[in-house]
Amino acid sequence: MENEIPQYLLKPSDNHNDLVDKRKVKLTFLDKTIMNSASAAKSIYIQAENTSKKDFISEVHPYVKLISLICFASIISVANNLNAQIVATAFIFSLFIVARLKVFAVYKKVFLLAFVFGFLIILPASLNLITPGKIILNLFTLNKPLHFWIYNIPLKIGFTENGIRVVTLVFLRVLNSVSFAMLIVFTTSFPAFIKSFRILGVPYTFLMIISLAYKYIFILSRTIEETYLALKSRLTGNVKNRNIRDLIGGRIFFIFKRSAIIYENTYFAMVSRGYQGKIILQSQKKITIKDIIALFIIIVSGVCILFL
């Protein structure tokens, strides 16, 4: 019998996007939102997978990680020396290598946050208008010095040596703080990290609300996705964004009602299994010698960085 399978299906292709011209495909705002939500869920899933790695840092007790985070963040904030911050950067980077994380992917996010909050916002502080000192890069020169209210504007305006030092110091502080926090997040599962807050005396009720809210986000997102795909499967042709917004807007009540029913059923299931209003969030994992050694390394390293 003659083969009636189209040739484009028989032709192997490593890149499935060859069959679709992306320039001709115009996604609606909801399609883009669902794609971005899927990307966020994927990153959370990857983070959970990273925490299951069998390396030294991932196996450290969550209590020790939380104490280390507070201790190291305090030391980074107090250290007022560029050399100390540079050593802290190298130390945190070495921890990323030990944890076998995707350093490039994580540091892209870290550098973006550090660039915005540790460089762009603080950049005006490098001018002699805010930080006096020796000008090493002159921007422009006025005809004469100006005086406005309580402010004195000098004749030459530019970047000073002290100002650049301040900006660099703040940038490194933000970079080190964010990178160390990312290290803890990517090597600790979310439930275990939430449970670790019990060591700070956070009430059980507050931790339970955070845990349920974390689950609720996924339940609500899944409900929105299923509702949207069910509606879209019944449509033909190109639909305008305004019509889709009206369509989805009319389903908002149903979405929240359905998610509330799911949570109510979950609560009844908990009651049927003996739930009496109290949840024990304490981890069954005990602190070992390895955890004490890890905490000792962090404290000693932090003290050494502080006194550089």
Image: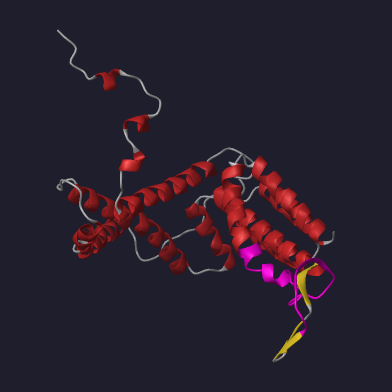
Image quarter (top left, top right, bottom left or bottom right) of the C terminus = bottom right
Q: Is residue 64 visible?
A: no
Based on the picture, tell me whether residue 261 belongs to the magenta stretch.
no
Q: Quadrant of the N terminus?
A: top left
Residue nearest the viewer, comparing 116 with 110: 116
Q: Nearer the viewer, residue 154 or 198?
A: 154
Left or right: where 39 falls relative to 83? left
- Which residue in the rendered view is the most extreme toward the bottom? 149
Q: Is residue 186 above or below residue 168?
A: above
Most extreme residue toward the top is: 1
Question: Is 133 contained in the magenta span?
Answer: yes
All told, the count of numbered labels is: 0
Give above or below for 151 relative to 198.
below
Residues shaded magenta: 117-145
Decide if residue 108 is on the left or right side of residue 10: right
Residue 69 visible somewhere in the drawing: yes
x and y, in percent, of residue 143 in the image: 76, 80
Residue in front for this viewpoint, 271 or 7: 7
| Residue 255 x %, y % | 23, 60
Relative image position of residue 39 (x, y in whole percent): 41, 47
- 2 horizontally vs 67: left or right: left
Q: Residue at x 35, y 59 (%)?
A: 216
Q: State which quadrant residue 254 falls in.
A: bottom left
Q: Position of residue 275 (x, y in %)?
A: 34, 60
Against 207, residue 109 (above or below) is: above
